[in-house]
Image (cartoon, rainbow, N blue to C red):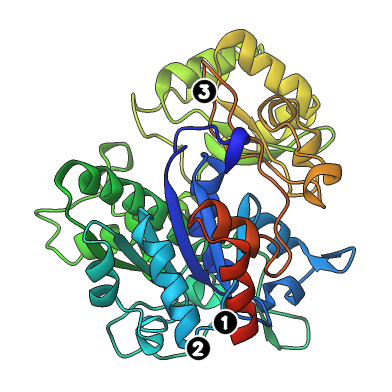
Amino acid sequence: MGAEARGLLAGVRVVESSLLGPAAITTHLADLGADVVKVEPPQGDYVREMTWPIVEGVSLMHLHVNRGKRSVVLDLRRPEAVDVYLDLVRGADAVVEAMRPGSLERRGLGYERLTEVNPRVVFCTISGYGATGPYRDLPSHGIAYDTWAGLVPPAVDDEGFTYIPEHPSMGINAGPLFGALAVVSAIVRARSTGEGTRMEIAQADAAAYMDWYRIESWKAYERPESEVTGNAADGYERRAPGTAGMREGVRYQMYESADGHVLFMASEQAFWRGFCEAAGRPELFERWPGSRYADHARGNRELHAELREIFRSRTSGEWIALGLEHDLPIAPVNTPRTIVDDPQFRERFPWIPASRLGADELPFPLKLESEPLPEPTRAPTVGEHTDEVLADALGYDADRLAALRESGALG
């Protein structure tokens, strides 16, 4: 990528064929310095028109997931364009197919063909439900992977209609992260052994894996109680997995503060003692000392009422300050809108300004002690870098570019 190439993955080149959100798999690689060449059809990836907000005519999704990449237009219906694609693969470390499995195969660019020109190429397909299973050909969008994984229960409005509740999108974010980790791992091996790798990842699988604790807990509970019990603090009673088993918690619970809410997490006896002393209420510990570990004082409504009044007596900021002063686990409760004003967020997430990327965007969440991460470039327009990439990456001269354009290979 010229003189600006920096970062942990400088010198790594990835060829990407993608549609919509799965392209985030290479966003992480580009953020770390890889040269990601996004190969698009003449009409381009319609992610630029999808969802909201639309920032000066272009979707925020495109501005974020395709930042730092270079766009090349190739009409893969034409054999000349297929030849150019293969030329790009010859010098690439990886090819990412971020769309339905087999999309490149149908254009004569499947894994076997790619390895003929580059035996060490890493080939990764990321899709909704994966390349196998009864749902592999089922059309889908990102929320589907979370509902499939059991992460999003239906909500019901006052008129009895079900609706999709507000929730963090897991599959469309975790899938690309796992995929990026796998691609980098495979590149490391390929550079050592000269052997390429073919792999695929499903965003639905990633959503389920991110909830491994609850899924595995339910599976563990299928075993007899003589083998799998609850925690000693609960008299070994089996609690519901994950946060569902925390609804009746008291020492581990959300509480209203004077100006918002905080999360109180004194499940360890030492933290509980420290809180009672710091809050000037040592008698609460004397009356309800609890167990040493994993004790939430479940169902203790009398203590619950006491803590409710205590937490209402100070602002969230004052409670966080108390936690810092006395080493107490008290956390802010933010929303996606209010978190930007949180001092921890402001310290850790310096916005990449709209003047650079077209929209204010969050940086890759990694800190290097010795150097800054490379600043991503704005997400490309369709084919913005076609001539640049074919010239500097493949050495095509003006005559070759003109011939390709005349043939229609470049759209």
- State the residue in front, 136 or 382: 382
- Residue found at x 73% / y 51%: 378
Asked if residue 382 lies left or right of residue 96, the reply is right
Three-letter code for the amino acid on which mark 3 is drawn: Leu
Residue carrying label 3: 368
Percent position of residue 372, x then y: 60, 24
Residue carrying label 1: 409
Q: From the viewer's perspective, is residue 146 above or below residue 35?
A: below
- Residue found at x 43% / y 40%: 11
Nearer-N-terminus badge (2/3): 2
Percent position of residue 152, x then y: 54, 70
Percent position of residue 284, x then y: 56, 21
Q: Nearer the viewer, mark 2 or mark 3?
A: 2
- Residue closest to the far right: 56
Asked if residue 97 lies left or right of residue 354, the reply is left
Residue carrying label 2: 78
Three-letter code for the amino acid on which mark 1 is drawn: Ala
Quadrant in the rendering for residue 192: top left
CA distance separating discs 2 and 3: 44 Å
- State the residue in front, 59 or 277: 59
Percent position of residue 411, x then y: 65, 82
CA distance separating discs 1 and 2: 6 Å
Give neighbour class at mark 2: few <14, some 14-19, many 20+ (Cα, 10 Å): some
Asked if residue 123 lies left or right of residue 375, the reply is left
Three-letter code for the amino acid on which mark 2 is drawn: Arg
Q: Quadrant of the N terminus?
A: top right
Q: From the viewer's perspective, is residue 1 above or below residue 20?
A: above
Nearer-N-terminus badge (1/3): 3
- Residue found at x 37% / y 80%: 101
CA distance separating discs 1 and 3: 42 Å
